[in-house]
Amino acid sequence: MRPKSFEYHRPETLKEASEILYSNEDAKALAGGQSLIPLMKLRIYSPEHIVSLSRIKEITQKISLSKDSLEIGAMATHDMLATTDSVRNNFPLLSTAAAKIADQQIRNLGTIGGNIAHGDPSANLASALLSADTEVMVYGQDGKKTIPINGFFQDLFTTSLEPGDIVTGFRIGLKPGYRQSFLKISKSDTAFPIAFVASNLKVESRFVEDARISLGVAGPTPIRAEKAEKFLVKKELNPENISKAAKLAVESTEPPDDIHASTEYRRHLLEVLVKRTLEEISTGGKK
Ligand SMILES: Cc1cc2nc3c(=O)[nH]c(=O)nc-3n(C[C@H](O)[C@H](O)[C@H](O)COP(=O)(O)OP(=O)(O)OC[C@H]3O[C@@H](n4cnc5c(N)ncnc54)[C@H](O)[C@@H]3O)c2cc1C
């Protein structure tokens, strides 16, 4: 069977790109192509219009650090996040999450914008960004807007982006005193993850002041383990509380059941990973 043909657009401005995406129902933006192209090759999805973002100067790969935030252009690649000092030193969770995406080829091409816009519950970067105060910067039919990451993911492969919306970047609030850990289990480097956890905690003299725990492949969207987070606040980060938090974290999860792992096995892995990230944080974590 011959693949369905499509019209390839290479606009030079966000306005032009947004217009094409808005006025054609079956149109998709193309960033690194590491999710969209495999879907097309497998004939799972065949858009009629592909809108390349590569020539648009307003959407960049720039990573800039200010006193209390990190701003990242949507076209920054996973490799850039993994290797840029300002990310590694100020939000190590994100650089570790990026370093653990697939292999070097995919990390060189895949972008943070694509990873988030795709709305995949197994997106490493989504969990990292969910564990911080992140704003998604978007250009759409009504101009620029920002969407808080909490609430951005609506359902499986569904986000709050509207027709014609293009993610242009991310603003991540940085707060001092947080310790972080990201752990993931997959069958091989190039295989999609079976489960992963991103934990970001403020701990003072062994007591938790703030807890953010994100779970990957735990349901139709990337999610926060709110019950466990609430439980941990004002508690000592000791083995007993860590075990209780890990159990609470998976209580309302709905991990998928597929050829890679059963729901129950994934839930078990998530509990183990929450426990290990908290243990890592209790002994220092990444600051
Ligand atoms: C073998 C393999 C293993 C992988 N393993 C992992 C893994 O372990 N963890 C992980 O997180 N990811 C994994 N990925 C996915 C990879 O990280 C992708 O790079 C990423 O999810 C999508 O980014 P992209 O730039 O390639 O987006 P594209 O493939 O270009 O686009 C993906 C989707 O997002 C939309 N989109 C892209 N950019 C924008 C934008 N700026 N605004 C609005 N919409 C946009 C597109 O229209 C499309 O629907 C894997 C991919 C492969 C092929």
Image (cartoon, grey):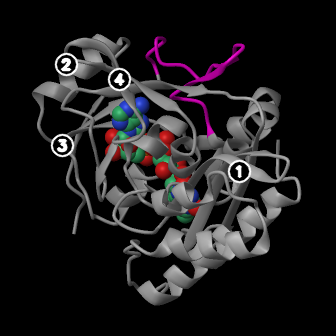
Q: Earlier in the sequence, mark 2 or mark 1?
A: 2
- Label 4: how many residues lie within 10 Å, few (<14), some (14-19) or many (20+)? some
Of marks 3 and 2, which one's residue comes earlier in the chain?
A: 2
Q: Is residue 41 magenta?
A: no
The type of residue carrying mark 2 is Glu
Place of residue 138 in the rendered image (x, y in percent of width and height, measured from the top left) = 36, 23
Residue 33 seen in this snapshot = no
Q: Would you say 223 lies left or right of 274 here? A: left
Element type at mark 1:
strand
Marks 4 and 1, how far apart at CA: 49 Å
> Which numbered tag is attached to residue 40?
none
**Could you say which disc has been placed on residue 19 in the image?**
2
- Determine whether 157 is above or below 23 in the image: below
Q: Is mark 1 within 8 Å of ligand 1?
A: no
- Residue at position x 78%, y 26% in the image: 86
Does residue 245 show up? Answer: yes
Amino acid tagged 3? Glu
Q: Residue furthest front?
A: 234
The residue lying at 23 percent from left, 62 percent from top is 2
Q: Which residue is mark 4?
A: 10
Name the N-terminal-most of marks 4 and 1.
4
Residue 67 lies in the magenta stretch? yes
* Horizontal side of residue 221 vs 194, given as left or right: left
From the Cβ of disc 2, is ligand 1 less than 8 Å away? Answer: no
Tag 1 residue:
208
CA gap between label 3 and label 2 equals 15 Å
Sort mark 1 into few (<14), some (14-19) or many (20+) by Cα contacts within 10 Å: many
Q: CA distance from mark 2 to mark 4?
A: 12 Å
Q: Nearer the viewer, mark 4 or mark 1?
A: 1
Residue contact between numbered discs 4 and 1, judged by CB atoms under 8 Å: no
Find residue 219 and report its image quarter. bottom left
